[in-house]
Amino acid sequence: MTRLGILVIHGIGDQQPDFAADFIGAVERRLGERADRVRWQPLYWADLVASKETELLNRLSAGGRQLDWGFVRRFVVHFLADAVAYQRVPGKAQVDGIYNRMHQRVEETLGVLESALDDRASPLLVIAHSLGGHIMSNYIWDQQHRHPARVLGATPFVRAETLSGMITFGCNIPLFALALPEVVPIEIPRQTAGQRPWLNLYDRDDVLGYPLEPLSEGYAALVEDREVKVGGFLTGWNPASHNSYWTDKDAIEPIARRILEMLGS
């Protein structure tokens, strides 16, 4: 029986280790009997940066300093500092840097998923929220280009050589593309003929989530952008929608349909 390995990675924010539990449950209910043909593996990485962000907040407010808009400041630090901490530092060794530590976590988690599959050549689907999409894109790019200074996987599965699809939501890759001389996407080795293998969901009210097709001809050929409306009465019309994809049926349903298409009959 065909097995599909699904890696789920979170994005920016104050995340918890069980971040994907409700999401996986909601998708599995829509998969019906075919749910047992999927092996899920959440990828949690917030612990790699959380302590530094908390330390920064404490240090900046020490000594009786009064900083207004405390909630907004915590939002900025926990959401934006993740992205800043992850970036490579030009001219610096990255062996112990956040970039490589993050990719080591990706490698380790893919290894756990590979071990849970009946066939280690099983197709891989990556589902990524927010900064998680950028992290996975960088990790896969480094594997495909055999970057000598980056983390390289020990097996074909860990090197994403069986990658068959990507699903992103609240994706902010376009913000990082500003630093690139040429915007070229990763390759998806096992894509199905006649279908763009990368599904990207975005809400127009989500200021941290963007379409990907306009980035370049390469992205336009690889990605299917789909606008969705996520969030409730208090969050659906503003930037708080960024964290609403996980449990909103407008995002869950197209994700489940894409997985069913990959599983086949």
Image: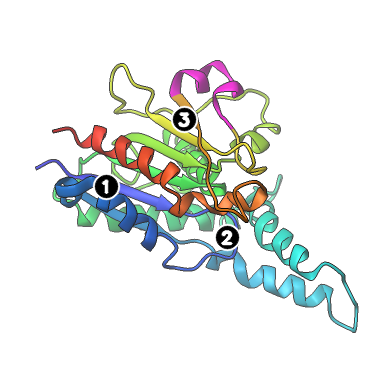
Q: Nearer the viewer, residue 108 or 219?
A: 219
Amino acid found under the numbered disc labelled 3: Ile
Contact, mark 3 vs mark 1 (Cβ under 8 Å): no
Residue 254 is situated, as x and y percent measured from the top left of the image, at 37, 37
Tag 3's secondary structure? loop
The residue identified by callout 2 is 96
Amino acid found under the numbered disc labelled 2: Asp
Badge nearest the viewer, 2 or 3 = 3
Earlier residue among tags 2 and 3: 2
Q: Nearer the viewer, residue 90 or 12?
A: 12
In this view, 49 is above or below 175 = below
Tag 1's secondary structure? helix
Residue 37 at least partly seen: no
Residue at 59% from the left image edge and 55% from the top image edge: 12
State the extent of the magenta-drawn residues as a range. Answer: 211-222
Residue 218 within the segment the image draws in magenta: yes
In this view, 174 is above or below 244 = above
Q: Quadrant of residue 85?
A: bottom right
Give the CA separation, mark 2 to mark 3: 25 Å
In the rendered structure, the answer to whether residue 211 lies left or right of residue 189 reads right
The residue identified by callout 1 is 30
Badge nearest the viewer, 1 or 2 = 1
Earlier residue among tags 1 and 2: 1
The residue identified by callout 3 is 186
Amino acid found under the numbered disc labelled 1: Arg
Residue 186 is situated, as x and y percent measured from the top left of the image, at 47, 30
Contact, mark 2 vs mark 3 (Cβ under 8 Å): no
Residue 229 within the segment the image draws in magenta: no
Q: Residues within 10 Å of mark 1 (few under 14, many from 20)?
A: some
Badge nearest the viewer, 3 or 1 = 1
